[in-house]
Amino acid sequence: MAPTERAGYWGPPTATLDWCEDNYVVSYYIAEFWNTVSNLLMILAPLYGSVYSLRAIREIRYLAAFLGLAVVGIGSWWFHMTLLYQMQLLDELPMIYSSCIFVYCLCETFKSKSTNNYSLGIFLFLYSVMVTAVYLAWKEPIFHQVMYALLVSILILRSVYIAHWIYPQAQLLVYIAMGIFLVGFLLWNVDNLFCSTWRKVRGKVPVLGVLTQFHAWWHVFTGLGSYLHIVFSLYVRVLHLKYKPRMKMAVKLASHLLPLVGGC
């Protein structure tokens, strides 16, 4: 059910998706206010993590993973602020690119030194190019969602394997990360499936307007879950290298965000 149409700074929406939050209600300059500002965690947390990743271990792929997540948050900010098709691509395509970086990081965990896996890198690059080309030609959001879900499934299976069979001490961190991400995914579906219900509730009880913006909560939970998953990937890498000073830095990186989990 499309949100209420209101005149705003960016003009009529041109994106193929328009979410359940009413447009231009809070601000004339922001189409979906809560869906926009909820990306702050997805932007700030990985920027923080990128600084510590260089101190924990000097392997550029982890810096790229953190910065990739931040780019997703920035793209999502612009998409929900404008509801323009170009900004939608800035949100959705980096989700594919950053997930490919996450897959690369997890698959390169058990090397004795930092090297480049050109075969895997080329495969993931071609996957990204294929998804981009098809999605630009066939503007079907479900295609993007399926391609993204495939990458997430690979990450989950690989993470569970590492946590169960290689480094059991990392189980708590990875299950917290996946649990938070799953909560976000459930809220995303609740927002999509019951949009008309939530809009009626917001109309009758205005104070629930913010609390029932479940797509915004999707940003919060998936942003935090993705951040902690990168921390998990970094943590098992330094465990494998057995480099204690850097391992302490990786643990510190995780512990700074874990208290937020209890707050959620």
Image: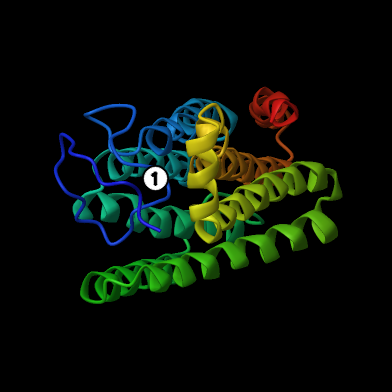
Give x and y (percent) for residue 187: 60, 50
Q: Is residue 76 above or below residue 152?
A: above
Give x and y (percent) for residue 118: 42, 66
Please identify the quarter of the rendering in which residue 257 is found.
top right
- Seen from the viewer's position, the closer of residues 37 and 180 is 37
Task: Give left or right: position of 136 versus 155.
Answer: left
Residue 76 visible in the displayed image? yes
Query: Quadrant of the image for the N terminus?
Result: bottom left
Residue occupying the point 34% across, 27% down: 26
Task: Give left or right: position of 79 versus 220.
Answer: left
The residue under label 1 is: 72
Task: Identify which amino acid the numbered label 1 is placed on.
Answer: Val
Residue 58 visible in the displayed image? no
Q: How many residues crowd around disc 1 within 10 Å: few (fewer than 14), some, or many (20 or more)?
A: many
Residue occupying the point 46% across, 27% down: 44
- Seen from the viewer's position, the closer of residues 195 and 252 is 195
Colour scheme in use? rainbow
Please identify the quarter of the rendering in which residue 244 is found.
top right
Task: Give left or right: position of 70 versus 238.
Answer: left
**Element carrying mark 1:** helix
Query: Quadrant of the image for the C terminus?
Result: top right
Q: Is residue 240 above or below residue 143?
A: above
Task: Give left or right: position of 51 versus 25.
Answer: right
Residue occupying the point 43% across, 52% down: 98
Residue occupying the point 35% across, 55% down: 2
